[in-house]
Amino acid sequence: MLSTIAILLAQSPAPTNPQGPGGMSPMIIGLGLFFIVFYFMIMRGNRKQKKERANLLDNITKNDRVMTIGGMLGTVVTIRDHEVVLKVDESSNTKVTFLKSSIQKVINDGDLSTPEK
């Protein structure tokens, strides 16, 4: 009986690929595709935000009410290449010069209203 089992084992073909069909290559390709898709999703979002910000800064006009990155509110008096002059106090006619890139957003009517509870 032992000799029969030894003969059967000797005649059975040895497995050529111990990892099964395909091996590691489908997993590596899938992982690579995942990282490529993830990269493009992140880069597309960043490009979209940069484009919106550039559009905001290019469309600032005189008499727009804006908020700076530091939270200061003012009305645009003068626009130069990279500078914006804001009037921050109507009563004393106080004007402050900021870099154009420090403008966070243009404030529309109702943006600063207190939310109803």
Image (cartoon, grey):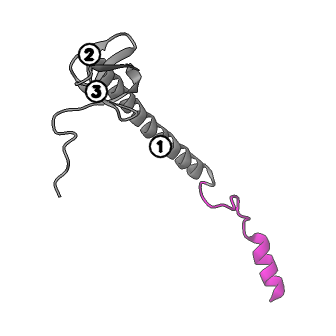
Mark 2 vs mark 1, foreground winner is: 2
**Secondary structure under badge 3?**
strand
Q: CA distance from mark 2 to mark 3?
A: 9 Å
Residue 104 in the image, given as x and y percentages of width and height: 35, 31
Residue type for callout 2: Val
Q: Identify the residue shown where x is 49% and y is 39%.
A: 39
Residue type for callout 3: Gly
Confirm or deny contact between disc 3 and disc 1 (CB under 8 A): no
Which image quadrant for residue 112?
top left
**Residue where numbered disc 1 is placed:** 38
Mark linked to residue 77 = 2
Looking at this view, name the residue that lies furthest to the right.
3
Q: Is residue 91 left or right of residue 8?
A: left
Judge the density around disc 1: few (<14), some (14-19), many (≥20) Cα neighbours within 10 Å: few
Q: Is residue 19 left or right of residue 65?
A: right
Question: In the figure, 31 relative to 56: above or below?
Answer: below
Answer with mark 3 or mark 1, whichever residue precedes in sequence: 1
Judge the density around disc 3: few (<14), some (14-19), many (≥20) Cα neighbours within 10 Å: many
Which image quadrant for residue 108?
top left
Residue 53 in the image, given as x and y percentages of width and height: 35, 27
Q: Identify the residue shown where x is 68% and y is 58%.
A: 17
Q: CA distance from mark 3 to mark 1?
A: 40 Å
Confirm or deny contact between disc 2 and disc 1 (CB under 8 A): no
Mark linked to residue 74 = 3
